């Protein structure tokens, strides 16, 4: 199997962390989850902590979510249901929300190498921030990453709301810091204008290279997340002198 490594800049989803509950007495009976969000087709096993006998499981709406005799919840279709655990005449409830199971393939630019498997690639560049359902070779320069469409749409929303701050963060990186004073871009990073002092720019020979790496690959990633085909992606970078408005360099 071919190996991949990518220099794309990944826009991580903002996923809130849920702090574990404080340990309680061993005799306390409670469900390990009181709320669940599952995609259609996903499963999750509920457990009634502290129970030592038989637990009876039931669903308030089997057309949305079912539950087995061992507490395994299966998301059937979009909607809401309540999973009920009955133990010694007491009931314990978990509210389940089932969301769309529709999937999307995002075609990311990647580069071949022999020291990283696709699985390691996914772990390195995405970690636990993105639920990857599958990752495979697309062609010699790209990989196809399959995720839930709901997750992709969340990324699109994050980009739309934060693209200006993201662009500013790129010119604040150590390799560009002090060279570019401002940046203006559209939401898809198709047309990027970098502002600089001419003397500073001309005394920084590596500035164009880092500008292309950072903004070019960010542009490619953002357009990939928006499902723009690789051959249809464009990125125009214009470097402009602050004082005169002179175009110092144009890259496309």
Image: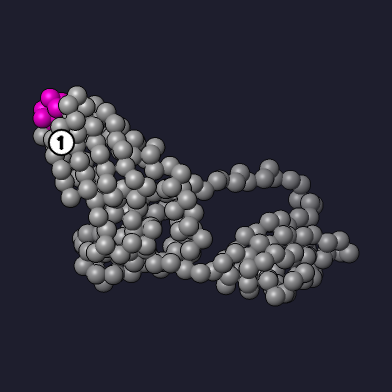
Q: Is the image coloured rainbow, by chain, by secondary structure, or in one colour?
A: one colour
- Residue at x 76% of width, y 50% of height: 26
Q: On the image, which quarter does residue 101 sit in? A: bottom right
**Which residue of the protein is positioned furthest toward the right in this rendering?**
89
Tell me if residue 17 can be seen: yes
Q: Position of residue 35 (x, y in %)?
A: 68, 56
- Residue at x 34% of width, y 50% of height: 188
Count of numbered labels shown in the rendering: 1
Residue linked to disc 1? 247
Q: Is residue 244 magenta?
A: no
Q: Position of residue 76 (x, y in %)?
A: 63, 73
Decide if residue 170 is on the left or right side of residue 240: right
- Which structural element holds mark 1? strand
Q: What residue range appears in magenta?
A: 198-204
Q: Nearer the viewer, residue 202 or 8?
A: 202
Q: Nearer the viewer, residue 6 or 101?
A: 101
Tell me if residue 122 can be seen: no
Decide if residue 203 is on the left or right side of residue 8: left
Q: Position of residue 40 (x, y in %)?
A: 58, 70
Decide if residue 20 is on the left or right side of residue 160: right
């Amino acid at each position: 199997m071919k190996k991949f490594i990518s220099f794309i800049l990944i826009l991580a989803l903002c996923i809130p962390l849920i702090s574990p509950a404080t340990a309680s007495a061993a005799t306390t009976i409670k469900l390990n989850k009181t709320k669940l969000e599952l995609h259609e087709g996903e499963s999750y096993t509920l457990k009634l902590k502290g129970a030592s006998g038989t637990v009876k499981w039931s669903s308030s709406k089997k057309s949305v979510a079912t539950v087995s005799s061992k507490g395994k919840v299966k998301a059937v279709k979009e909607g809401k249901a309540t999973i009920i655990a009955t133990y010694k005449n007491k009931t314990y409830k978990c509210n389940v929300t089932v969301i769309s199971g529709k999937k999307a393939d995002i075609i990311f630019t990647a580069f071949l190498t022999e020291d990283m498997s696709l699985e390691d690639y996914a772990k390195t560049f995405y970690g636990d921030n993105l639920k990857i359902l599958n990752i495979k070779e697309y062609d010699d320069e790209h990989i196809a990453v399959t995720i839930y469409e709901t997750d992709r749409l969340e990324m699109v929303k994050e980009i739309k709301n934060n693209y200006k701050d993201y662009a500013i963060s790129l010119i604040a990186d150590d390799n560009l810091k002090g060279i570019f004073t401002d940046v203006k871009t559209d939401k898809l990073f198709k047309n990027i204008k970098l502002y600089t002092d001419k003397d500073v720019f001309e005394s920084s020979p590596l500035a164009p290279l880092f500008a292309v790496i950072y903004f070019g690959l960010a542009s490619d990633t953002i357009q990939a997340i928006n499902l723009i085909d690789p051959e249809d992606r464009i990125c125009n970078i214009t470097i402009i002198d602050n004082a005169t408005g002179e175009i110092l360099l144009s890259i496309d």
